[in-house]
Image: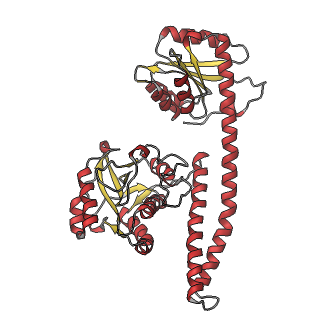
Amino acid sequence: MTPQPSWLDVPAPHETRAVRVLLVEDDPGDAMLVRYAVARQTDLHYELDHVQTCADALVRLERSDYDLILLDLTLPDTSGIETVESIISSAGQAAIVVLTGHDSKQLALEIVHAGAQDYLVKQHLSPDELGRAIRYAIERKLIQRQQLRLREDFIANVSHELRTPLSAGLAALDLLIGGNVGELSVDQRELLIILNRNLVRLKAMVGDLIDMSSIQSGKLTVMPRRVSVAAVVQQVVDALQVKAESLGLSLHNFVDPADELPSALCDPNRLQQILMNLVTNAIKFTPEGGSVSVGAQVIESADQPRPEGNVAVVEVIEILQFGADRGAMRKAAPASTVDGEGKMICLSVVDTGPGIDPGEADSIFDRLYQVTDGSHPGGLGIGLYLCKQLVTSQKGQIWLEDTPIQGATFKFTLPLAE
């Protein structure tokens, strides 16, 4: 879809370009009333398209850009707050005004909290009220975008400014720790290693902030190609093995190159970033004596986002908890080598930690959301958000598996390379 200039980007009062409106309304009578009310507006020129279902609205939003969406809350294929959530995910820059026959303050609050700019009751609708709502909704959307842009620009600029001195500091620390500028005492070396570890963590946070800013501005770069999943998993496990062992944990890699897992079509650097985030989180929340494992297998696309295999996941965790050899582990969660259309590679990160409260399962991938666990230092709350964005940008899905035993199981999919 070729981006079109938005009226929101040029809010000058003398602007003459038509305001593009999408009316989503299945009742012919209500649609006629809205058309009449829009036609009565004289301050601006409006171009109105009309569809009757949420599905048709999503198709229109995919093909065209709109300045305003007038959305009926009850449609043939969806109703209630789900209608708003479905449209908002594809609305882009458009302001949204919800039209409903229900005069409920609680519903109005839920609609605004979901992201709509205004809420109108059809029985009270008049040309003057609709005109006011349209103008205010577009203005609110413009202000929101301006505030978001200022915040994102600030985060991006600060993050970029921090990255350069951090890189220089880490390079200097490497020289010191390596003994290139003189011998160190045991205590000095230990302190420098602690400093290095924390600067590496800080640099990762800065990188996450830059990526988050890129996502919000639509500038995130993903360069997919044929990738050996087994090789990337091994790199991640090797990088985090020492950290896991220092905390008294076992880190297992059950993606065996001998299993001939098909290649994935993805960005290898982004795949590594996703796995580093998930495995680091698993290590962080797993108590001493526990285990973290990484696995992969081929599944049917139709099995997302809840692929079959919960029994296998239970067996895997039980093996980690009570011990078994590598062969038994692979038997519990076999990797298919059958390539074909409609199949995905599914990677899993399993830990034996305290798990995640089911009430938080729908929120953990939200931006700035942090799991409520006072026993661990909090991060920025963007790691899982980035994982989701990086996975979905590569035509995959990510989710928290619902398992009946202790621990957390994160899974995500990537398309097979043809």
Residue 369 is situated, as x and y percent measured from the top left of the image, at: 52, 48
Depth check, front residue: 311 or 87: 311
Give the residue at x 59% y 90%.
Answer: 185
- Count up the numbered dots: 0
Quarter-of-image position of residue 338: bottom left
Q: Is residue 202 left or right of residue 328?
A: right
Q: Decide: is 373 above or below 116.
A: below
Quarter-of-image position of residue 82: top left
Residue 162 is situated, as x and y percent measured from the top left of the image, at: 67, 63
Q: Is residue 158 left or right of residue 29?
A: right
Depth check, front residue: 360 or 157: 360
Q: Is residue 349 left or right of residue 174?
A: left
Give the residue at x 57% y 29%.
Answer: 112
- Residue at the far front: name it: 374
Q: How is the image coloured?
A: secondary structure
Quadrant the N terminus occupies? top right
Residue 363 is situated, as x and y percent measured from the top left of the image, at: 47, 44
Whether residue 6 appears in this view of the structure is no
Residue 165 is situated, as x and y percent measured from the top left of the image, at: 68, 69
Q: Decide: is 307 above or below 199.
A: above
Give the residue at x 27% y 68%.
Answer: 258
Q: Decide: is 343 above or below 95.
A: below
Whether residue 381 appears in this view of the structure is yes
